[in-house]
Image (tube, helix red, strand yellow):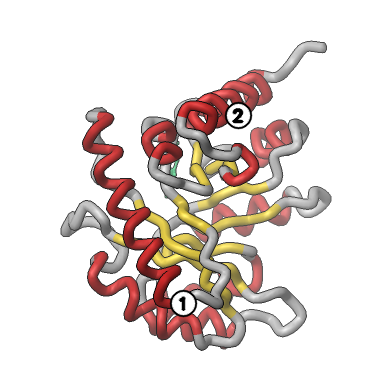
Amino acid sequence: MLQSVIAQHIAKVRQQVEQACHKFARNPIQVKILAVSKKQPATAIREAAATGQKAFGENYLQEGLQKQQELADLDLEWHFVGPIQSNKTRDLAENFAWVHTLDRFKVARRLSEQRPEKLPPLQVLIQVNISDEASKSGVAASDALVLAEQVMVLPHLELRGLMCIPAATDDYQQQRATFAQMAALQKRLQAAFPAARLDTLSMGMSGDLEAAIAEGSTLVRIGTAIFGARQ
Ligand SMILES: *Cc1c(COP(=O)(O)O)cnc(C)c1O
């Protein structure tokens, strides 16, 4: 059967993930692929979904909501991975399963208040500004546990772990070192809250997924390698 280009790309990414898992003695079942579909049309998501890909990530709220409507006939899991505007939390709370970019208690409280009762708790990750860049969102590593403690008690959120977007670098050792810091922080979080389901470390993109898997990523966010360059 003739495979679409997107299907070929997904097969290749799955293979890369499996190879990295094999190399670093990780179980591939524990590394999920999130297809980041920002600036890609709904038709591209439909092609990806036809291969069995279920989890999609969007960065821009209006664009994401639009595509959710166009694809309402599919059973997809929507993740929000973009910066959160505090006056736009209701649409997020009502329409997404996961939010990766939580970095303020005020936003967390609003998301919890606005999460509809009939839906499961919103699954959230705290974004850590691990490379300490002035331009990036995310909490400082030293503030992550304090925010986690506050988020943990909100009734309609479930904190699942941490996420980062490190400073871009092609240096593999540098990538590993940064992801190792995230893994250490996740371990501290798990030790501080042993009863919580802190099983998710969202790190690794098209250019650094092997380093992320080497250091314990459980969710890689892949855009370009699946969909090609963005418009
Ligand atoms: C765009 C984006 C990605 C995907 O990046 P690629 O390099 O295209 O794989 C992953 N995570 C976040 C938060 C993004 O904004």
**Disc 2: residue Cβ within 8 A of ligand 1's nearest atom:** no
Q: What x and y, as percent, mark residue 217?
A: 46, 46
Numbered disc 1: secondary structure: loop
The residue sitting at 65% across, 34% down in the picture is 44
Question: Residue 12 is drawn in which quadrant?
Answer: top right
Q: Residues within 10 Å of mark 1 (few under 14, many from 20)?
A: some
Q: Looking at numbered disc 2 in the image, what kind of residue is underneath it?
A: Arg
Kindly tell me whether residue 231 is visible in this rendering.
no
Mark 1 or mark 2: whose residue is earlier in sequence: 2
The residue sitting at 42% across, 61% down in the picture is 162
Q: What x and y, as percent, mark residue 95?
A: 65, 67
* Dot label at residue 14: 2
Query: Does residue 146 sit above or below 74 in this rendering?
Result: below
**Left or right of 33 on screen, residue 225:** left
Q: CA distance from mark 1 to mark 2?
A: 32 Å
* Dot label at residue 193: 1
The residue sitting at 32% across, 71% down in the picture is 144
**Left or right of 55 on screen, residue 86:** left
Query: Does residue 202 sit above or below 39 in this rendering?
Result: below
Query: Does residue 43 sit above or below 100 in this rendering?
Result: above
The residue sitting at 39% across, 43% down in the picture is 215
Q: What x and y, as percent, mark residue 135?
A: 20, 56
* Dot label at residue 146: none
**Left or right of 120 on screen, residue 214:** left
Q: Residues within 10 Å of mark 2 (few under 14, many from 20)?
A: some
**Left or right of 203 on screen, residue 39:** right
Residue with the most extreme top position: 2
**Quadrant occupied by the N terminus:** top right
